[in-house]
Image (cartoon, helix red, strand yellow):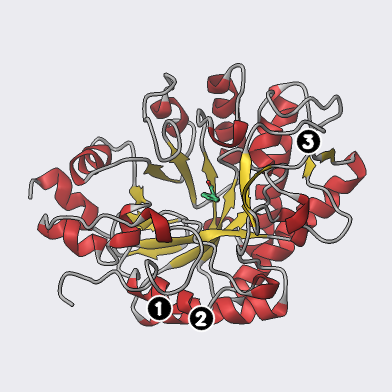
Amino acid sequence: MNPADALLFTPTHLGDIAAANRIAMAPLTRNRALPDRVPSPLAITYYRQRASAGLIIAEATQISPLGQGYLDTPGIYSAEQVAAWKSITDAVHAEGGRIVLQLWHVGRISHTSLLPEGEVPVAPSALRANGKTFTANGFEDVSTPRALALEEIPQLIEDYRVAARNAIAAGFDGVEVHAANGYLIDQFLRDGSNHRDDAYGGSIENRTRLLFEVVSAVAEAIGAGRTGVRLSPVTPVNDAHDSNPQPLFNRAVERLDTIDGLAFIHVIEGATGGDRDNIPFDYPALRARFRGAWIANNGYDAERAGQALASGYADMIAFGRPFIANPDLVARLRSGAPLAELDPATLYGGGEHGYIDYPALDA
Ligand code: 8OZ
């Protein structure tokens, strides 16, 4: 192993969170929650098997019933959900791992069949996304949303605050606010989805306001050193688009940096799960604006990861899909062992198969 790659296996800190190595498990939606949006007991085994990651960022988890956009995703707003998550965090901690929860509100990427009776998705503006979601009937076009009223925003922020406190009560080491991939906070950031003319729309200052207020509220509730944020400046997924992403995300990161001691920013470079070079973007310019830890993601292999750490650009690298079929990804990257391929048929939904039956190499 060359010296740059060896850096992956050295410990680090993300704010108040101590990680044994520089490899994060990226959040992965697996659609196996039980009715009432309670994480499945299978998730105890799934996350325990992957606890050698320096940090597990658990799957996107809705902060409220209106924050759900796909079938069988878990929540963090009921006592039953908190109790189920506690068994998962206990299992990860028993293996010496660290785990944070990704706090999610999908905004307009939802379907009425997934929401409480009579509700429609909420968004910055009443603009339907050109996209699909996964419902009980398979892939369906997302529903037309309604615009959140200005008066509703304090309650939305409160929902994030309560969800963050619930995550800590469930034993998580912290949270990652999901502000990426065209979901609610990202919808507010971008001029393709945000046509508001109040304090939350128009200028970059106004479009970054919700992000800043949510992350400030979460940091105040659970500690900045346990709070991170995920961004995806140029991803096109879920109809995310902005006329000028560089100044938008430069300013977003500048504002996040004013929250003293914020643990980390986690950036998806390029198109989520796809082309890293879809649109030119200066990621080091973002990194230079933030004093906390930097997690880089999207299509990294050990060599590229080692270079990103050695150059000082990143503190940790998040691997997503490779963790699905390789529960012992850390050991495989360390030994240079081959990686198993995942089965796309068992990615979303189902039971044990394709979830907790991928073997480790030494099994
Ligand atoms: C894949 C399928 C459903 C949701 C994301 C939470 O893209 C997701 C997601 C990914 O961030």
Mark 2 crowdedness (10 Å alpha carbons): few <14, some 14-19, many ≥20: some
Whole-number angstrom distance, CA of label 1 to CA of label 3: 38 Å
Identify the secondary structure beneath mark 3: loop
Q: Relative to the observer, which residue lies in front, 53 or 329? A: 329
Identify the secondary structure beneath mark 2: loop
Whole-number angstrom distance, CA of label 3 to CA of label 2: 35 Å
Residue beneath disc 3: 124
Q: Does residue 227 appear left or right of residue 336 in this picture?
A: right
Along the polypeptide, which appears first: circle 3 or circle 2?
A: 2
Q: Relative to the observer, which residue lies in front, 131 or 29? A: 131
Mark 3: is the Cβ under 8 angstroms from ligand 1?
no
Residue 148: image x %, image y %?
Answer: 85, 41
Residue beneath disc 1: 45
Residue type, label 2: Pro
Residue in the picture at 73% in, 36% down: 209
Identify the secondary structure beneath mark 1: helix
Above or below, comparing residue 221 to residue 282 in the picture:
below
Residue type, label 1: Thr
Residue 98: image x %, image y %?
Answer: 41, 68
Residue 112: image x %, image y %?
Answer: 78, 51
Q: Which mark is residue 41?
A: 2
Along the polypeptide, which appears first: circle 1 or circle 3?
A: 1
Q: Relative to the observer, which residue lies in front, 347 or 322? A: 347
